[in-house]
């Protein structure tokens, strides 16, 4: 199936896609801040420049776009046009994600992945926040016991 946009228009559209400060990332950051968590963003000293870094908990949060990172939800589907290119591109992205996550874990960090689709509604975002809070509370308890 041919692209619905001209080459120039497609280039313009693709140029506007953000890699930092995306809507899902901003929603999650605002919610974490509201809950009292303080964090760094896009720390260049860590593998993959994680979206959210919680140093106190030695935890990184990667907010991944479903399309760009090959999620299995409906938003993660492959385009019909130029599919060989997209298959390779998305496989490269997934390999890079796995490598960066592995490197971060080797440095002693816990990596939490939050998918874009899980930030799309308040209910889904609340579920992700509960999951994150449980992890952070466990990390804090372990730190008090001296086991991390």
Image (tube, rainbow, N blue to C red):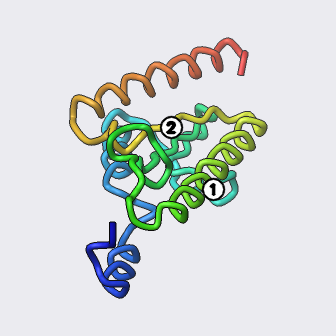
Nearer to me, 77 or 39: 77
The answer to whether marks 2 and 1 mark residues whose Cβ atoms lie closer than 8 Å is no
Q: Residues within 10 Å of mark 2 (few under 14, many from 20)?
A: few
105 sits left or right of 90 in the view: right
Q: Quadrant of residue 128?
A: top left
**In the rendered image, the vertical position of residue 100 relative to residue 137, given as above or below:** below
Say which residue label 1 marks. 92
Q: What residue sits 50% from the left and 47% below the top?
A: 52
Residue 99 % position (x, y): 71, 46
Q: What residue sits 51% from the left and 25% below the top?
A: 136
Under tag 2, what secondary structure?
A: strand
Which quarter shows the N terminus? bottom left
Disc 2 or disc 1, which is closer to the eye? 1
Residue 47 % position (x, y): 69, 52
Say which residue label 2 marks. 113
Q: What residue sits 63% from the left and 35% below the top?
A: 58
């Amino acid at each position: 199936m041919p692209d619905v946009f001209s080459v120039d228009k497609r280039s313009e559209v693709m140029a506007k896609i953000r890699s930092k400060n995306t809507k899902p990332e901003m929603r999650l950051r605002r919610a974490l801040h509201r809950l009292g968590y303080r964090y760094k963003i896009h720390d260049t000293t860590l593998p993959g420049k994680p979206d959210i870094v919680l140093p106190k908990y030695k935890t990184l949060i990667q907010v991944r776009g479903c399309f760009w990172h090959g999620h299995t939800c409906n938003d993660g589907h492959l385009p019909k046009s130029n599919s060989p290119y997209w298959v390779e591109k998305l496989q490269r992205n997934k390999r890079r994600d796995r490598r960066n996550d592995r490197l971060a874990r080797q440095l002693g960090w816990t990596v939490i992945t939050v998918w874009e689709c899980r930030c799309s509604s308040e209910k889904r975002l609340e579920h992700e926040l509960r999951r994150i809070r449980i992890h952070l509370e466990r990390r804090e308890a372990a730190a008090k016991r001296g086991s991390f």
